[in-house]
């Protein structure tokens, strides 16, 4: 679970009195404003919003309410005279906003600040970055709960507004120059629903929560689809429906649904029911106990169609063919995909790769492994990490690049100086052998030039996000690098210049490549998460993008 909190900010320069319900306390932390926090971290968003509306009505002043959930969702609402007049919400499903000009006018923002705020609300950024930028531009301590305030002895630091405006202006200028042409993906298919219960993208299988005719949702009822390709474009075909009586299966309160989890490196095969607070009730565990569920859920072998291509998740590296199947490597295990009973099956070998953090960290030396799958090609693994040595109070940082064979035998090591926290760079990476360059998280590690440089503005776009950097051939037969995130695709030429970019509706659930220079993507507009209410815009879409 990530960080969750909520707070209220009341514009009250005259210190007018107002009623504050038990369980809340107010603090003077920003000029002209009072901040209200929960005394205990109950995260009662509904009660907080009700309190904000009551205060704004009582003193006839603007009030801002903030909710921040699991580092995935940030919502800011402007309340005037007891009614919501403007809001901004960013979460995994996208960006939602209304009446931002009203917010700008109410906050009396200068033109340059208003311009910066309008740019922020147009950006696909993380909830963490969004709340940081709003805090700076509005000059309010939005990222705050009582535990954090107590930890800092009642002191808060609000991000600098001028610095934020400067950084945002530089980002906007660079974007205009860097991204090449916009290219739309072709929509092949659209299904109504939210993925839940059983999602196995490797085998092209998804189950969806779909509404009844009257718009309601029956928890425990799911509609199952399989990806098929009958000589034309791939399509999800409806296979069967499932219905479980959750009340009879579990006495847990606030149930949100049931899930089927196949055996993996984290646990055995299991059936679980979850509640709103992520508590689970294990209904069945292990192959024998799950058999009666499995037979209802999975398709019989004679009806199961194996996907024509390996399907990946964002953050995956491409699999390579080995004697054990289609394989990926990471620092703790080897992951093989084989075919069993007409299903792709994952087999994990717990092979810890050396050298690693424990081998290379000692007095005056520190090493961080890159937390992603490793790049592999032609019998060689390329492993990256950040290696730092401390000398007389000074530190010397390098990207350490290890070359190994598929049996994890170390072949050679190279170092490239770096002047930032490289271990914070996310995403799988690819190695351009002929240029001796590694493309990762919007950066290029050049082993020939001994440099680590940002690829135009991609480092800003990919900061703190999972991504896959993949080399592939386009429709024209040329080589390209595709950088795939949950919502965007950037296509680079082999000089690492952006050729085109594609914005997607929803978040990527899976993608695959064909032999003709196409990328296929499955996206979902929404996920089944708090507040666990079905949204009418819930769609699963299948796209095709040609290079």
Image (spheres, rainbow, N blue to C red):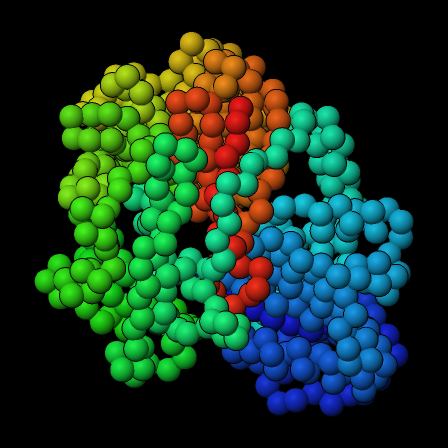
Q: Position of residue 180 (x, y in %)?
A: 67, 25
Q: Residue at the spot x=31%, y=43% of the render?
A: 202
- Quarter that holds the N terminus: bottom left
Q: Is residue 442 visible?
A: no
Q: Residue at the spot x=22%, y=48% of the render?
A: 303
| Quadrant hosting residue 294 | bottom left
Q: Position of residue 357 (x, y in %)?
A: 31, 37
In the image, taking residue 535 as reference, residue 521 lies left or right, namely: left
| Quadrant hosting residue 270 | bottom left
In the image, taking residue 57 as reference, residue 478 lies left or right, namely: left
Taking depth in this image into account, of 247 and 398 the one nearest to the observer is 247
| Quadrant hosting residue 109 | bottom right
In the image, taking residue 440 as reference, residue 383 lies left or right, namely: left
Q: Residue at the spot x=61%, y=68% of the render?
A: 67
Taking depth in this image into account, of 498 and 169 the one nearest to the observer is 498
Q: Is residue 190 visible?
A: yes
How many marks are shown on the rendered structure?
0
Q: Position of residue 239 (x, y in %)?
A: 32, 55
Which residue is at the far left? Answer: 288
Q: Residue at the spot x=58%, y=47% of the render?
A: 505
Q: Position of residue 385 (x, y in %)?
A: 39, 31
Taking depth in this image into account, of 547 and 159 the one nearest to the observer is 547
435 w.r.t. 499: above or below: above
């Amino acid at each position: 679970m990530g960080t969750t909190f909520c707070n209220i900010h009341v514009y009250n320069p005259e210190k007018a009195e107002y009623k504050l319900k038990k369980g809340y306390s107010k603090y003077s932390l920003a000029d002209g404003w009072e901040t209200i926090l929960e005394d205990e971290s109950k995260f009662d968003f509904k009660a907080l919003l009700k309190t904000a509306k009551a205060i704004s009505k009582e003193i006839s002043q603007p009030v801002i309410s903030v909710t921040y959930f699991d580092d995935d969702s940030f919502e800011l609402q402007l309340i005037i005279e007891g009614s919501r007049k403007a809001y901004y919400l960013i979460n995994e499903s996208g960006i939602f906003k209304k009446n931002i000009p009203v917010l700008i006018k109410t906050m009396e923002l200068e033109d340059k600040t208003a311009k910066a705020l309008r740019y922020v609300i147009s950006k696909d950024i993380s909830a963490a970055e969004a709340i940081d930028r709003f805090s700076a531009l509005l000059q309010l301590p939005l990222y705050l709960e009582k535990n954090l305030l107590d930890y800092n002895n009642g002191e808060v630091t609000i991000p600098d507004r001028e610095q934020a405006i400067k950084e945002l202006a530089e980002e906007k200028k660079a974007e205009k120059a860097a991204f090449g042409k916009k290219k739309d993906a072709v929509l092949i298919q659209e299904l109504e629903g939210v993925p839940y219960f059983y999602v196995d993208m490797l085998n092209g299988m998804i189950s969806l929560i779909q509404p009844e005719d009257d718009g309601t949702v029956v928890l425990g009822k799911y509609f199952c689809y399989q990806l098929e390709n009958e000589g034309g474009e791939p399509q999800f075909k409806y296979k069967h429906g499932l219905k479980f009586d959750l009340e009879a299966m579990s006495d847990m309160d606030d149930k949100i649904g049931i899930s089927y989890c196949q055996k993996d490196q984290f646990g055995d095969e299991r059936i679980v029911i979850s509640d709103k607070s992520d508590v689970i009730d294990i209904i069945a565990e292990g192959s024998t106990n799950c058999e009666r569920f499995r037979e209802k859920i999975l398709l019989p072998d004679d009806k199961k169609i194996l996907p024509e291509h390996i399907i990946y998740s964002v953050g995956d590296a491409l699999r390579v063919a080995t004697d054990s199947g289609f394989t990926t490597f990471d620092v703790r295990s080897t992951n093989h995909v084989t075919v069993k009973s007409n299903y792709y099956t994952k087999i994990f070998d717990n092979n810890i790769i050396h050298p690693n953090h424990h081998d290379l960290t000692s007095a005056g030396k520190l090493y961080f492994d890159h937390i992603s799958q490793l790049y592999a090609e032609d019998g060689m693994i390329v492993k990256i990490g950040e290696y730092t040595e401390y000398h007389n109070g000074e530190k010397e940082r390098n990207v350490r690049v290890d070359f190994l064979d598929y049996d994890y035998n170390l072949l050679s090591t190279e170092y490239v100086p770096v002047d930032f926290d490289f271990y914070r760079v996310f995403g799988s990476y690819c190695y351009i052998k002929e240029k001796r360059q590694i493309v990762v998280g919007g950066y290029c590690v050049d082993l020939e030039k001994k440099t680590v440089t940002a690829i135009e503005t991609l480092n800003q776009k990919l900061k703190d996000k999972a991504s896959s950097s993949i080399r592939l051939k386009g429709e024209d037969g040329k080589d390209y690098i595709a950088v795939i995130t949950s919502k965007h695709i950037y296509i680079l030429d082999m000089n690492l210049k952006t050729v085109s970019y594609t914005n997607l509706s929803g978040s990527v659930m899976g993608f695959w490549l064909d032999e003709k220079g196409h990328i296929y993507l499955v996206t979902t507009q929404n996920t089944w998460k708090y507040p666990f209410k079905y949204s009418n815009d819930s769609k699963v879409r299948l796209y095709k993008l040609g290079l």
